[in-house]
Image: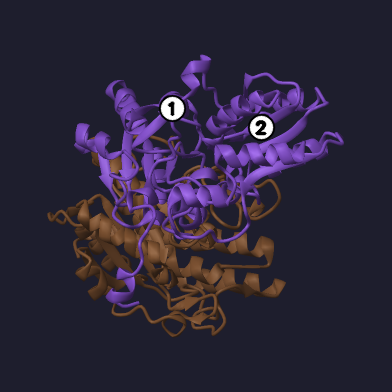
Amino acid sequence: MTEEAHLHNSGLAERAHRVRRNALIMAETQGQGYIAQALGVADVLSVAYFHAMKVRPEQPDWEERDRFLLSVGHYGIAHYAVLAEAGYFPEEELTTYAADDSRLPMSGMTSYTPGAEMSGGSIGLGLPMAVGMGLGLKRKGSKSFIYTLMGDGELAEGPTWEAAISAANYGLDNIIALVDFNQVQADGPSMKVMNTEPVSAKFEAFGFFVQRVDGNDLPKLVAAFDRAREHPGPQPRIIICDTRMGSGVDFLEGREKSHFIRLNPEDWARAHAALDARRAQ
Amino acid sequence: MTTAALGTLTPALKAPDIAASSIDEGHRTVSMPFGRALIRLAETRPEIVGMSADLAKYTDIHVFAERFPDRFYQMGMSEQLMATAAGGLAKEGFIPFATTYATFASRRCYDFMSQAVAEQHASVKLIGGLPGLTTGYGPSHQATDDIAIFRAMPNLTIIDPCDACEIEQMVPAIADHPGPVYARILRGNVASVLDEYGYRFEIGKSALLRGGNDVLIVSTGFMTMRALDAARDLKADGIDVAVLHVPTIKPLDEMGILREVRRGGRLIVTAENHSIVGGLGDAVASLIGRSGLATELRQIALPDRFLDAGTLPVLQERYGITRSAMCESIRRWL
């Protein structure tokens, strides 16, 4: 790794740390939530927003921006964590998460939050919407990419595959789909709820340029995002990111029931301490 | 069933009658009013794009596709994708007209229209062919419940145009409307009736096409054409029938409807090419109830059941939505 790359990656590590801290602040205000997912996907979102994407947080509707579609609406907490770090809204607002009249509802919606481009939550809308935006951006001659974050459970949704077929059919090389493959969904381990493997082979067969990476390894994520943007072929792109639920907070990593976590008040301080300890390493 | 058994059946009506447009005798027709109106509009509006889920030819949008091939997106047989991708195109500043049959538009697309389009204020125009009982294919293709399904969706405008004259005016009007719209349309050779009344379509406005002192028919879709014909027939019997056309089911023209209903002294009849559950009749009944009026209401509508397969003239008579069946019902109720 060059010194420049090393510095860049350590900058990303600091960003990812702050994104995790933001997520903990939000979860603590509610005492519960999708914190394990937010910690797990923090590296992916940090590389997206602070390495790959072309955005202007002070001008969320800037025409030349790269688009980001949060298909997994309950990852709102993760998205707000990165949007606050990027400066879309003040960090102080994080403590309003999921409160009445907050701009940060528990499930992400476009009309509520600066920088939120879609209303997700009904799982399976992200990739189909990316197809429409991909067609529209091509019609406009735009060079912008559309990123969409999906969960691994989402791969069981039919519309995801309808969209995959059409994205390849229309040569939508401006789509970069991201899958947070954390192996957990509402009813249990994802591949036990519905085994969608082999996922890479499926997307390859559907005509995608596919990469599967460790979603908690910043240099590998950086390389994967770079390849996704620079790949010369006319295919839509997908990065399947194997992530660890709760990543960065040791006592939450590997916790068996982690889809929706409730913690005692004292455990939130413990979580912050664990995060800080890892940063010091 | 064996071929031999099939050979013993002698259909009274032939295949074309199964999917024929609902044109009653004596009316001028216009060919493909929706597709042609969309082409006319798109000539000057580059943001208009077309989509279909493998039913372009059967919703008249194929002529738009031929005229503007690079502005038409064939989405294949995937209505859910089409509705959601239409939302994506709208986010990028386009105005997509997306077509399929009304059954698939409503039953298949509901969540996608709700969450990817209506909740996100996307300017998508979803166009459903084969409204109500306009095909003999059976319940899979008979959109008897599309309006009931869509009426529950916030932020969605719902239009059931009567004829070619109205479809031609509706296309530019809904393009100019900033939000999502669902319209169910007739295709092929479509009767043109309302031009005789100097009719002007406006979203959310009803139109009194004919005055009358004995009966008020509040109708939508092509049932307005039949109501006008029935009114002429009943006049010969000395029954004076008014016809209030209500093309926009949502938002309902409550003031316009109440103004006519409040006149009093008339039998109030709603008429629609839709199930008796959840359509115009229910909307008018609830409006009357909420307004504190104690007015009896009769409904001409399709029954709350899966309809038979067969030929249209027979089925429409069986379910009471032909001109003659309307006259018979009204005479009975008076």
Residue contact between numbered discs 2 and 1, judged by CB atoms under 8 Å: no
Q: Residue at x 54, y 48 (%)?
A: B317
**What chain is the purple one?**
B
Residue on which disc 2 sits? B218
- Report the amino acid beneath label 2: Val
> Color used for chain A?
brown
Residue A205 locus on image (x, y percent):
20, 70
Q: Secondary structure at mark 2?
A: strand
* Residue B236 image label: none
Mark 2, chain letter?
Answer: B
Q: Residue at x 83, y 34 (%)?
A: B291
Visible in this render: residue A109?
no
- Report the amino acid beneath label 1: Gly
Residue A151 locus on image (x, y percent):
43, 67
* Location of residue B165 by image quarter: top left
* Residue B26 image label: 1
Q: Residue at x 29, y 45 (%)?
A: B56
User: For the residues marked 2 and 1, what is the alpha-carbon distance in whole angstroms?
Assistant: 23 Å
* Location of residue B51 by image quarter: top left
